[in-house]
Image (tube, helix red, strand yellow):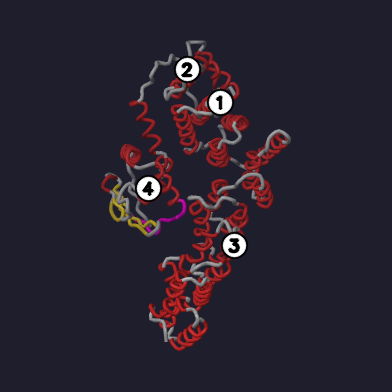
Amino acid sequence: MHVIHPLTDAEWNELIAYIGEHVQDVTLKRGFQYYKQNRIRSIAMPQSYHIEADVKGKETYHVKVHLKNVSASRCTCPMRRHCKHLIAALLWYAERQGRSTHQIINAKILWELKGKKSANPPHKPIPAAVKPIEQRKVKADIRSMNVSEWRSLWNDCVTPFSNIIRHDAYLKSNLTAMNAIKPKLPPALDRIYSLNAYIYLLGKITQWSVPSDYGAGYKTRLALEDVMDLIHLLLGQGIPLTEADKYAWLRIMETLEAIRQLIRDHPLSDAMIHLYHQLWQDWIRPNMSDSRPYIDELSALDALIHASNGRAQPFTWLYFKTIMLFYLARDQEAWETLRELSRAIFLTTSHLTPFFGPLYDAKDWPRLTAWLAETGPMLRKYHNEHFQSQYLDYWSGMLRHSPEAEPLLFETLAQMLPFSRTYYQETLLTYEKWEQWIDYQLATGGEPLEFRATTLAPIEKNAPEALLPFYHQAVERYVQQKNRDSYKLAVKLLKRLFRMYKKMKQEDRWMLFLETFTARYSRLRALQQELQKGNLQL
């Protein structure tokens, strides 16, 4: 049992600020992946406010975290400090203290936003958007307005800014105007209002920054990134609803429709797709009492798919339909929809993590196994940096709990050949499937000398007999090329064979082979010369 020493709010905020200032965003994301993939092998708090953990990366690294003085924290990895192993340990601590892990993951974003407020004042003063135009009446009505009415109201708020170049003050100025007409709202409704304000501005900025020959301006892209960061942070905090929050639930459903409308206008935006999924994952699902919202959303998506026929391919709606079917545990239908989708677009591992992640977190190993096996062959882009972390690592985590599923991993990777060749070979070696690895090399014409000695050393040690045909066939291929360079390669392999036979204490078998080999190729003078140089003649 771990004794958790809690930090005060002030100490926690100081820790978040330090992380935001000193740790790179990519390091935060990788640390989050390590934590979710259960790469923490052991962890403890031997002293107050001190964490010690072993975290598995390329090797197992030992990290010591000083919670009240993070700058003094150290890790045995090459980075030494401010590394992903440190972040994984901090996420473990945050979750057990009841703190939001999203504050750590988004620490860089929060720190940069604070920096922009002080370091980047607007180039031109932007006037306040809202006059005292019936503000008292507006504030009284906002509580009873629906999302559509909020958006109509905001149309008036942002009108004065419509012709101003979108510099980095645009977002702040508009939010100030939109919040100026907001009364004090119940906590849940206040969050929904803020989320819809962000979504509204996202639509405005995205509409303004349509693709062109020159692309969107630099500061416009910054504004887009800032509003998406605010959205992800707000959604990540969740929104616990009570029975008294009936109207808040209706506003969330209207927010979902607003997002669908935004996606209609920008169907190929990955940011919009992630926004839709995160709304379901962090706000809608935790507050559901039954499966009715999934069924209603399926009907809405089917209508959108039907309406898209003949005008545009409904790729986004098909993907969302798969997510709803997944939530309903209608896996066969979900896989069929994904297959339909994979025939039209390149499915990548990032499309599949919304399915793998929840199953892994729920420890639903049988269902995760089925999803990994079914969806792997649908992938058509394997050679990217995320294939290991977003696909194979889920297999590894699942197999720690269901080792009997191991044959299915290799069966699935074999179905994905030839595109999965690199990962197939590496995985066979990782799981010490020496014979299968050698069979694959023999079937595909692999060359022993293409591999480093360190790759082959474990096989020479554990399955030398199985490795002999791989070497012998390569020697024959080199000799058949009949040139001095290939003879040198053959002799190099013959020396390896000699060492293996000697280690196996089968020198007689080696001598018989060498005698036959030398006699068979006695007329190849250059080969005989190379054998002599290598001290391989009888």
Residue 165 pos. (x, y %):
46, 20
Return the disc, 4 or 1, that comes first in the chain's sequence: 4
Does any portion of residue 246 appear in the rendered image? no
What's the distance in space between the residues labelled 3 and 1, CA to CA? 45 Å
Q: What amino acid type should be assigned to the residue bearing mark 4?
A: Ile
Which portion, as a residue range, is magenta?
Answer: 36-44
State the CA–CA distance, disc 3 to disc 2: 56 Å
Q: Secondary structure at mark 2?
A: loop
Identify residue for label 4.
Answer: 87
Query: Residue tagged by mark 3?
Result: 414
The residues tagged by marks 4 and 1 sit, at their Cα atoms, a distance apart of 37 Å
At 56% across and 62% down in the image, what residue appears?
409
- Assess whether mark 1 and mark 4 are in contact (beta carbons under 8 angstroms): no
Residue tagged by mark 1?
Answer: 207
Mark before the other along the chain sequence, 1 or 2: 2
Q: Is residue 41 magenta?
A: yes
> Which residue is at the front of the view, 501 or 228?
501
In the drawing, does residue 494 fall left or right of residue 366?
left
Q: Disc 4 vs disc 1: which is toward the camera?
A: 1
**Tag 2 residue:** 164
Q: Kindly check if marks 1 and 2 are in contact, taking CB atoms under 8 A apart as contact.
A: no
